Amino acid sequence: MSKVIKGGTVVTADRSYTADVKIENGVITQIGDNLSGDEILDATGCYVMPGGIDPHTHLEMPFMGTYSTDDFESGTRAALSGGTTTVVDFCLPAPGQSLLEARQMWDNKTVKASCDFSFHMAITWWDKQVFEEMAAVVDSGINTFKHFMAYKGALMVNDEEMYSSFQRCSALGAMPLVHAENGDVVAQLQASLLAEGNTGPEAHAYSRPPQVEGEAVNRAVMIADMAGVPLYVVHVSCEEAHEAIRRARQAGKRVYGEPLVQHLTLDDSEYANADWDHAARRVMSPPFRSSVHQDSLWAGLASGSLQVVATDHCAFTTEQKRLGLGDFTQIPNGTGGLEDRLPVLWSRGVNTGRLTMNEFVAVTSTNIAKILNMYPKKGAILEGADADIVVWDPERQKTIRAASQQSAIDYNVFEGFELKGLPRFTLTRGQCVVTEDKVETEEGHGKFVPRKAYPAVNRALSQWKELTAPHPVKRDPSKMPAGV
Ligand code: URP
Ligand code: ZN
Ligand code: ZN
Ligand code: ZN
């Protein structure tokens, strides 16, 4: 059974052109004019783009005494309804737990996935066992390791652990990721805010100022450089962090930065809301920032100093957020966004002229596939690529309402956003699961996407490291002082 997407404009990261796209057995088999097939999807007036890839989600994540509410069932359904066709989630070993055991636990969660998925592995503790298991993790198709520089006493690793793990990543051809906030300083700020009677959600933002993020990014950049690995900084929220990344890239370091759609479009005034629930629902780390920081992030996407847009989707219900009533440090950290990332970024980015359509495709899909080493299986409209496609109707409109969302939580941080530009169809490996408002996903359709080690950047860095490593100078014995 073949399908043809007919009459649309193909929009990729590097160009836009009119063509039909033919799909057989879940992959794109032909791109050209006047194609025929068994089933026709009408793309008149639409853009045919690679499906979105969200490089940062936490589905059914055990965190702060509870589990994030969207799991691989509601989470991947939400993703597909908004045009995202691949999610990259984090396997999170409890401190002391085997990485391979954690991997097994995450494999079990994904049986309900309706879109394809991949994993990052978190390094939450360090010893010989972790060092050894990292090789098996890489062999199993995970080439990225996440390090939390915050969440002291829970997930945080110190500099010694981070440097050891970064060196191991370098040897294995993998890439480290960092959640960059100085966890020691955050812990002190939290304690003094609570002691002063600042117990509400607004204190969450005061406890995590831009400086804690900027400091941590600078530190991670230098540690990665010493270890000879590329570095990927997740949820870049402020100018201080962006500046550190910009400067590193200008100096030739291979550093990537990932802003979230939430930080681009929501600011810190949310925490001043008189309604406790409203503010607590927006508690995430790093917190939302002022417009100066938002402008910096948009500029980074346009200029290329920041490369990808994610959601860090980690959705807690209002009831879960209330675990932190009376003590902001107990509010589960995290917000949703999986189904809204593409539409919100289009409306606030492309419709305003901040991003071109091609830049939109780059930051929501193609750059991610390249950086994480799953291109061109994912992130491409090319013959042979998986038919993960969103047919985008620039005229379709809606207002975001929690009442009609796919996500399982009871609110939406973008409530009331007016959008223009939405999926007409979403296809996951050729299966059309979204037709405008109709969402018919298939639980269990989603497959693991393995990602191999040693992408080009790692090879270049290890070659450079080898050339510049300390070597003894070979000297002519006749030119040595006597007696040596
Ligand atoms: O607040 C956040 N970001 N929650 C999810 C876990 C993390 O730090 O990425
Ligand atoms: Zn984080
Ligand atoms: Zn996260
Ligand atoms: Zn299927």
Image: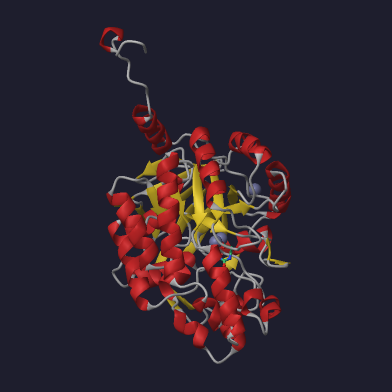
The percent coordinates of residue 131 (x first, y second) are: 62, 38
Task: Give the quadrant of ligand 3.
Answer: bottom right
> Residue 65, can we see it?
yes
Residue plotted at (51% across, 45% down):
163
The percent coordinates of residue 298 (x first, y second) are: 34, 67
Residue plotted at (39% across, 78% down):
290
Q: How many marks?
A: 0
Residue plotted at (30% across, 61% down):
302
Extreme residue toward the left, this view: 479
Which of 422/281 is in front? 281
Which of 463/48 is in front? 463
Q: Is residue 14 left or right of residue 89?
A: left
In this picture the colour scheme is secondary structure
Image quarter hosting the C terminus = top left
Vertically, is 10 above or below 204?
above
Which of 189/342 is in front? 189
The percent coordinates of residue 411 (x first, y second) are: 61, 79
Q: Is residue 184 left or right of residue 218?
A: right
The percent coordinates of residue 311 (x first, y second) are: 51, 64
Vertically, is 114 above or below 372?
below
Vertically, is 202 above or below 22?
below
Image quarter hosting the N terminus = top right
Which of 460/261 is in front? 460
